[in-house]
Amino acid sequence: MPRAFRTTWDDVDTAEWEPLERVALLARKSPDLPSFHPGEFMYMLRLSAPRRRHIHLYKHYDTRRYLNLDDGGHAYEYCGWTPDQGDRSGGMYRQHRSLADAIDRLDLWLFELERPMLRSFPPEAWPPDELTSDAKRPYDLPYGHDSSAGPRAAR
């Protein structure tokens, strides 16, 4: 298991969707991964990590689970908070063993049950698989906006 490392909060004005878009596209094209769309997520914040790495925290609207990705699409798991880091602490993280492990933790299987959990942005509503330009992202909302409206408000 990779070692955990400390992170700190970054002040950013806009959400970074590209890592999530790439991973979501990969998942939709892979028979071994459950499909999901970036429009099912809220951008929560960006963390700074050692070696100038940034980790973006994305929270699924329905399952409330996180997918934490760096700029290259590598996934990380939260390992807890350390009180000695102060107010800017983002907590401790370590790299997941695989992207599949990280996606499994989203609990997307809940949408496949005989009595499935309601999926507020279902696959039949997803736009085509091409990566969208910055101007066409329905889920690219201003950082800090009321996320309760979510991506569905822009459809």
Image: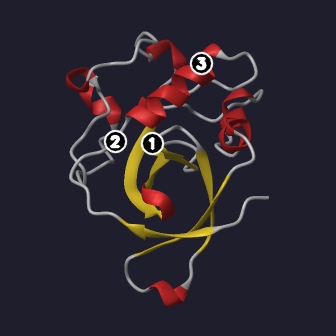
Q: Residue furthest bottom?
A: 84
Give the amino acid at mark 3.
Answer: Arg
The disc label shown at residue 28, or none: 3
- Horizontally, is 85 left or right of 17 in the view? right
Amino acid type shown at disc 1: Asp
Q: Secondary structure at mark 2?
A: loop
Q: Distance of mark 1 from mark 2, alpha carbons?
A: 9 Å
Reply above or below: 77 against 60. below
Q: Is residue 56 above or below residue 112?
A: below
As drawn, 25 above or below 130 = below
- Give the residue displayed 46% in from the left and 12% down from the top: 129
Say which quadrant the C terminus sits in.
Answer: top left
Left or right placement of residue 77 versus residue 71 in this view: right
Identify the residue at image location x=33%, y=19%. Answer: 132
Binning the other alpha carbons within 10 Å of mark 3 as few (below 14), some (14 to 19) or many (20 upward) gives some
Compare residues 122 and 73 and report the one nearer the observer.
73
Count of marks overlaid on the render: 3
Q: Residue at x 44, y 16 (%)?
A: 125
- Which one is in front in this view, the residue at disc 3 or the one at disc 1? 1
Question: Residue 88: x percent and y percent?
Answer: 38, 77
Please give the label number shown on residue 71. 1
> Mark 3 or mark 1: which comes first in sequence?
3
